[in-house]
Amino acid sequence: MTDEVDEVFEKAADLFAVLSTPVRVRIISQLCQGEKNVGQLLENIDIAQPNMSQHLNIMYRSGVLGKRRQGAHMFYRIADESAVMVCRAVCTQLAIDAAVM
């Protein structure tokens, strides 16, 4: 049983590490609205294209995002709904806390 619990904690820590930057949380937020390519993400997230690609690659390698190529464009989508649930829960609670203060 301890090995299973340790594995859960390890996976949770890995997910938190992937979501540890505001840019990645913004990417999750944008992709909750549907699949987007890098250019579409850059329209709403103000960072340099190479930086965006680096964040997307980290999120893809971790399994949080999926991707597909269409012509010259790479489209990204949410592949792990648990990342969405964590982001929503935390952001919602923080918004509630901010409104109360």
Image (cartoon, helix red, strand yellow):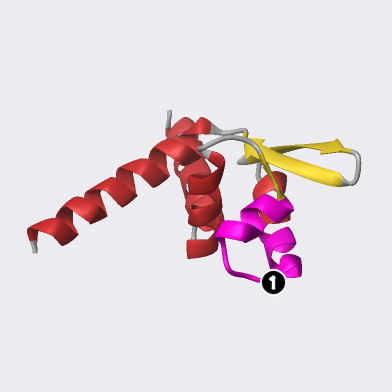
- Pick whichever, 22 or 43, lies toward us: 43
Please provide percent x and percent y for residue 47: 62, 70
Lateral position of residue 82 relative to residue 88, left or right: right
Check the image and name the residue furthest to the left. 100
Q: Which residues are magenta?
A: 38-55
Dividing the picture into quadrants, the one containing residue 51 is bottom right
Q: Residue furthest right?
A: 71
The residue drawn where x is 56% and y is 58% is: 44
Magenta span contains residue 51? yes
Q: Which one is nearer the viewer's eye here, 95 or 20?
A: 95
Residue 94 lies in the magenta stretch: no
Q: In which quadrant of the rendered view does residue 50 lie?
A: bottom right
Q: Residue 58, position in %: x, y?
A: 68, 54
Mark 1 belongs to which amino acid?
Answer: Ala
Prevailing secondary structure class for the magenta stretch in the rendered image? helix
* Mark 1 lies on residue: 48
Please give the name of the residue rendered at 23% of the width and 54% of the height, measured from the top-left corner: 95
Quarter in which the C terminus is drawn: bottom left
